[in-house]
Amino acid sequence: MIDPSEIPPAGKTWRATVGLVDPDLPNWRRVRGAQYRELMRALPLTASTFMVAAVLIALLFATSIPAWQLGLWLTCSVALMLSALLLSRHAQPAMIQGPRPGALFRSGTHSALVGLLWSLPPALFAVGSTPEQQLAASVICCGLMALSAMTASPVPFVLICYLVPAALGLSIMMLEIGAITLAPLPIVYAILLSAGGVGAGRALIARHWTDHVLAEQTEVVRLLLREFEEAGADWLWQVDSAKRLSAVSARFARAAGRAPGELEGLPLLDLLSGDTASGDAADALRRLIDQMNGRERFNDLVFEVLVDGVPRWWSLSAAPRFTPDGSFDGYRGVGSDVTEQRRSAEKIDRLARFDALTGLPNRREFIDKLRTAVGQALGDRYHCALLLIDLDKFKPVNDTLGHPIGDRLLKMVADRLRGLIGHDDVCGRLGGDEFAVMLTRVGPGMIEAAGGAIIAALGTPFEIDGNIIRIGASIGSALAPRDGRSVETLVRNADLALYRAKDDGRGTLRRYDPSLLVQAERRRAMETALREAIDSGDQFRLVYQPVVAVDTGAIQSFETLIRWNHPTLGDVSPVDFLQIAEEARLAGRIGEWVLRTACLAARDWPDHIRLSVNLALSQLHDRQFAATVLSALSHAGIQPHRLELEVSETFFLKDDPLMVAVLDSVQALGVRVVLDDFGIGYTSLGHIRFGRYSAVKIDTSFVRGAADGNRESLAIVRAGVAMADALGVATVAEGAESEADVASMRGLGLNRIQGHFAGSPMTPEAAAALVCGDMPDAAASFRDARAG
């Protein structure tokens, strides 16, 4: 809406003020019409004055000017004034919407004719007259010019059209009577009157512009109020100084579900309080009472009101009223029913705080409730417990049966958990297949009982669309305030206990123990140290353990083993740091360093000695791993057939097409692949049957077990050897530490052995010296030791 405080810039130019141009602005024609109406309104006075002045001029010059000249001039003057009066009477009613086209030209022409007529008395009649006649003519003409400036200023163009010829007539008279210095004065006078007229015209335009804009705004407000009264959802209300309702409107009564007469005189607080007892309603009423007692304005206070027994939500705003003498007279304001908005807000808030799939509190809501419970536990003799629950074997359900079945399974898990917790306990879904239970007022044995019930409930098979689904649960628990005085600490400690439960075989409950935090801190410190060691590149070293033929004792290959000597931790066992490296996604970087370093060492060995390197699981998930192997071989200058890559059987507990594709691409280079840790993966013998491996390494535990006569170990070793022999695949016994182990493995048909009996891990220099003849013959040493 246009600001009524000033005219838009387009209407402020002198040409628009004078009337020469009409800006393309709303209401401008109405403003022009107002200008002309002001002009026409003053025209009767102007015309009458001009006619009286014409008579005075005729009397003044009656003795000095021929009668026919004066008569003609007087007749023309009176005729012009009468025609102007007649014109104004017909034109004024039609100018409400603005002047007609050509009105400015006609008015200016009429004004110019009047000016020309009134330029004649001083320019013609006063020549040869007495000084008294000349002075009288000048006074009359100047007076008419001043009168025109007052009455014609609404349309400055009309004023200027009159002033120019009138001023010229006076200047001519001054020149004719010889008053040359006075000749410019009428022109200056006309200019000043014109400037004043333009200023007055601009003020008039501004006033009428403002009036029209304010009229439009008033009309808009009136229409809005009418719409508000007829179709709006809000209503007006007021109370007297005693807070009793007065002048109750029909709409307010409908909103309250009562007749206006029932509400008249009813205390507002009685209507708002009703039977509601919620904390929010009580707080809103207290704020309302405080502000009304303080006679303060209030906005958007929300109250819960019972309307026909149904809760509704009202939003009230009001300002205090005062009588003319300044005394307090109550409140008047507006109210609206915001029930739908409130319900929408509550729905949005619920979606933000509760899991959409299961209806359980989500992580945010659960943590908030846990924070409240921990705070109460700190000041109470009762404890609260947190149980973190991770579903076992849930991912295969999604992978094999699909996510819709997985979602239904999560709903069923949530239903079973709800049935296991007490009224004051809370169950939530933290995300994915991770749930949590908070137990309040925990007594002795309650955590173990609750954990056992959860494990048993979730271990019971689920049936979905004819599918029998068996999962389980691992649980980690922590007790507040003993195991944590803050939510963050409690969650961290329960999480540590959950990791322990998973490591201990799943399907178990483990409670937090301070030693778990020590182990976690040690692991974190080791991970940090491991990253620093990778970056520095001078803390790792490689050693090489020979693999020899059982019959001849000849060295067939060397297995590469990594060692880590930390400046402060000392020698760290590979068993400790390699698992951390895999979990921290550092194993790939370490594995690449091992591969490249070992290939450089092997280039000094004879061509028949092979190099064996263990692979990390992450390397088999790297699509570019074959390129890395080729780069290492090329840089070291050794043939692909001399490299053996050992892959643990445990990697194949799950079918992974990517690992198979990576192994195939490596074998396509001519690199050998060895199946390591055979037997511990509890997988089928089909791994050997696929023919991807040049050798199978029997795990140390089965070598020892077979040497001790363990039937299971003997069966696994014999089965592996039989299939390997049938496919022409070599077999390697790991952990051969004694002659008895060697004899046992020879009897079972294994081809090669690896262990301290065959040779301990050695430096790259020692390995090179051994295979290049700078040390005693390894095969002879092996035969001598075996004979001894």
Image (tube, rainbow, N blue to C red):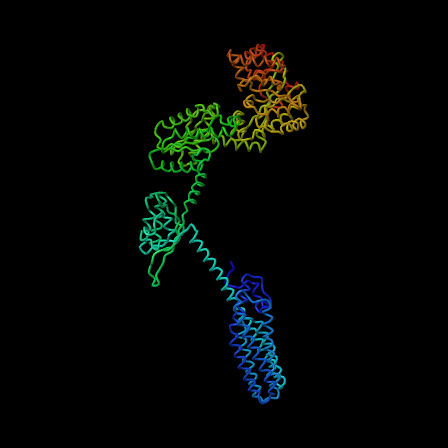
- Residue in the foreground of this view, choosing between 565 and 380: 380
- Residue in the foreground of this view, choosing between 570 and 470: 470
The location of residue 233, given as percent across then percent down, is: 42, 50
**Left or right placement of residue 47 versus residue 631 in this view:** left
Q: Quadrant of residue 594?
A: top right
Q: Is residue 497 visible?
A: no
Seen at 46% across and 35% down, the residue is 356
- Residue in the foreground of this view, choosing between 776 and 30: 30
**Left or right placement of residue 297 versus residue 26 in this view:** left
The location of residue 120, given as percent across then percent down, is: 61, 82
**Left or right placement of residue 332 versus residue 714 in this view:** left
Q: Is residue 641 visible?
A: yes
The location of residue 528, given as percent across then percent down, is: 52, 33
**Left or right placement of residue 370 versus residue 99 in this view:** left
Q: Quadrant of residue 197?
A: bottom right
The location of residue 403, given as percent across then percent down, is: 51, 30
**Up/down of 491 relative to 732, above or below:** below
**Up/down of 83 relative to 714, above or below:** below
- Name the quadrant of the C terminus: top right
Seen at 45% across and 39% down, the residue is 352
Number of residue marks: 0
